[in-house]
Image (cartoon, coloured by chain):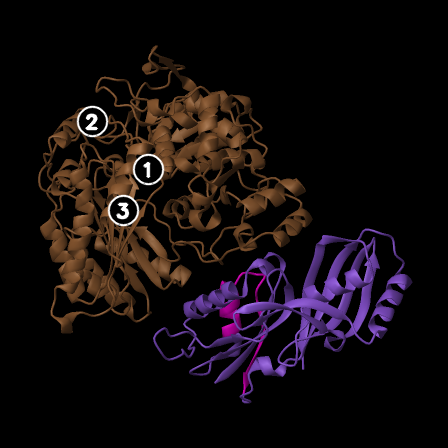
Amino acid sequence: MKFRIKFNKKNYLKYISHLDLMRLFERTFNRIDAPIEYSQGFNPKPKISIASPLSLGIESEEEWMDIELLEKVDEKDFIKNVNSILPSDIQILETEYIEDNTPIAALINWSVYEIYFLLLEDKKKIELENIIEDWLKQEEILIERYRKKGRNKILVTENIIELMKDIELKSLKNNEVVLKGKLKIGESGTLRPRDFINAFIADNNLNIDIDSISFKRISQII
Amino acid sequence: MINKDKLDRVLKKVDRPARYIGMEINSVKKDFKDAKVKFVFSYPDIYEVGMSHLGLHILYNLINDREDYLCERVFCPWTDMEKAMREEKLPLYSLESKEEIINFDFLGFTLQYEMSYTNILNMLDLAHIPFLSKDRDEDFPLIIGGGPCAFNPEPLADFFDLFLIGEGEERTLDIIDIYKEHREKGYDKDEFLKTISRLEGVYVPKFYTTDYNEDGTIKSMTAIEGAPSIVKKNRVRDIENMYYHEKMIIPYIETVHDRVVFELFRGCTRGCRFCQAGMIYRPIRERSPQKLKEIAAKIVENTGYENISLSSLSSCDYSQLEFLIKDLVNEFEEKKVGVTLPSLRLDSFSIDILKELEKVRKSGLTFAPEAGSQRLRDVINKGVDEEDLIKAVSYAFKEGWSKIKLYFMIGLPTETDNDLIGIKELSYLVKELFFNRPKEEIRGSFKLTSSASCFVPKAFTPFQWIGQDSIEEFKRKIMLVKDSIKDRKITFNYHNPEVSYMEAIFARGDRRLSATLIRAFEKGCKFDGWGEHFKFETWLEALAETDIDGDFYALRKRELDEKLPWDFIDCGVSKKYLIKEYKRAIIGELTDDCRDNCNVCGIDNCEMRGVKSEI
């Protein structure tokens, strides 16, 4: 049966990769003897799937994962036992048994991000808000990125204007900027926060400290 | 604590940032300020390598199990991290508290191989700690070294405040206890060092002076300030009740050995004459099967690891191996936990045991004949003959293995070209054994890899007096073997003789080499054990600029009465015995396994005399 888990990934643990995270959950479930279903075949693997893997270096307040269980477990005990083994910066927040067979990844269309960076020039709040508004008014925002085509990588130009919405300035204090917005994720297109911010900075000629950029996923929505 | 914003900026730029964050399951985070003594343990290589070192897990838990004390970790940042740290002016920090290394009481390095020495200097530099012991006052951590290379600590003598010779676990706590007392009543670095220099197994280099003869050899080494003239190695007497780690830190990233590891036994009775570990870790001391099961169960429970590896110098020599393996496999089969044994030998090799262990997966098999001919195997006292190899390999093929690795050394004493051709012949023989079978029995695709390393003579072995082959001679010999192997199914690999030359210099070096190390570091040498970073030309310049003749240390044959830089250490095995073994080696005479017959090596209270493996 499908068991849906919401968890977070914070602070330094944003620096562990998706594969590392999978290994961490695998080991943790093993340690509490969770009745997880294994795949068939030569190299059996526990059935764990994470909705939309985070890139290395991004924090998240809301990650989703489905696991297949052979029998029901008590949800409270499960959360308590798993969280006692997991590090404090990766913790299970909620669980739910799911009847619907749709994989979690297919349900999610938007990721909500907060993006932080440090401006190296003085800008008023209203100036930045106008910049954002004007930028979004355009018919197209083009970015170049590498796409896999067969075994090769080719450079393609892509219009990302449809891949973002509700972009706003969340705060500006001492030149520290926090943007908030929804970026598309999933089969109908994906806009990575790194590509988004690079385009925003370049298009608007903002002078910022590149090494200061950091991302946080706030939630994932349908 | 270091500046966390800076750290964050740095971590965003580097490859595999998880190397530098700590926070792993089973890592221990104590309140830094509250700890009475703060120890930071370092393996001077990258995280993945260091975390695979068993000694780290033992010492880390040993110290942290004491409420008053704290032990954290630091590894050598990879080159991208080092660059980013220097750009941001971020000092070296510990993984747990993210605390500057300079704020610890002790910085302990494990010395596993000579080619990590420049990393030690690099780490001190990143920590803003002066290289030389004499330049460090009470405000700096005490730099302490241990591990196999501490058996010839002299090339590092100027950098370290003290070394622990031999098995460190018990003595480490003694030293920390005494340090705490000294701190409480007004600490003076010299007073403290004087006090601990009296302890068995402790070597404080500043209390020893060395004089040299005109020909560059050592004239005398004198102990001053009441330090003992002979430093006896530490040795754990009661292995059954010795401390063991119940937990292991579980790295987020994949490391070299990602599994439960603990010791099956210490020491080795084989007496291979090239092997330093076989001499310095005598006598052999076994843990009981009950104890091993108890340890295994605890660590498995605390880690959730799916594999157990029993470590020792020669697994098959454990006297109740068959019994133990059956027991462990039974116990852990249900939990899907596998058991592996490294260091299997082909003489006492039992494929049945391997069958028990590898019920599912058939990985490659490795054998170490070490030398190509029987004559040379007798010289090094590798008590293995061709018959043993044939038997073991044939049986392995019959049981379905098809990938074999053979390990050899090139440049062993008395070696001739005929011995080298033996490497080719043995490789071809293994291939024939695979194919000279009825067609229906041949399964899998055959692959043989024969690897040769360049022999490095080590301190405290019967070969400590011999001269290493020159780089040119190594190259000639390597090409001789390489050109003789003309079979697509056999791959011949070899080590870089230039690295082995540098290793030989430091393996038997003296105090005068510390200047060379500093010079090499300044010229950019680091990660010398990593092929892509080893800069031989730079090393040669560093030797020349510090007036050091590398050949004097690496290539020169020593007279038996020469004073050697490590002679002040008593490793338990007597020099008389090493000389006897050296002489027997040259005439190709074998020496019995100590379990069969005591060879009077000088070790006191050896309990394993005559205790044979049941298989």
Q: Is residue B520 above or below residue A173?
A: above
Quarter of the view holding residue B136: top right
| Bounds of the magenta segment | A77-98
Residue A10 percent location from the top left of the image:
62, 62
Please say whether residue B514 is one of the residues in the magenta stretch.
Answer: no
Nearer the observer, B66 or B23: B23
Q: Do pointers 3 and 1 mark residues of a single chain?
A: yes
Report the chain holding disc 3: B
Q: CA distance from mark 1 to mark 2?
A: 18 Å
Are dots 1 and 2 in contact, CB under 8 Å? no
Q: Is residue B597 above or below residue B560?
A: below
Nearer the observer, B484 or B75: B484
**Element on which disc 2 rests:** loop
The mark nearer the N terminus, 3 or 1, is 1
User: Is residue B224 visible to the viewer in this orientation of the structure?
Assistant: yes
> Viewed as shown, does residue B573 lie left or right of B244?
left
Please say whether residue A90 is one of the residues in the magenta stretch.
Answer: yes
Q: Which residue is mark 2?
A: B574
- Amino acid on which the number 3 mark rests in the picture: Lys
In the rendered structure, the colour chosen for chain B is brown
In the rendered structure, the colour chosen for chain A is purple
Residue A194 percent location from the top left of the image:
68, 64
The residue lying at 86 percent from left, 65 percent from top is A131
Q: Which residue is mark 3?
A: B482
The mark nearer the N terminus, 2 or 3, is 3
Q: Which residue is mark 1?
A: B167
**Element on which disc 1 rests:** loop
Q: Residues within 10 Å of mark 2 (few under 14, many from 20)?
A: some
Report the chain holding disc 2: B
- Amino acid on which the number 2 mark rests in the picture: Ser
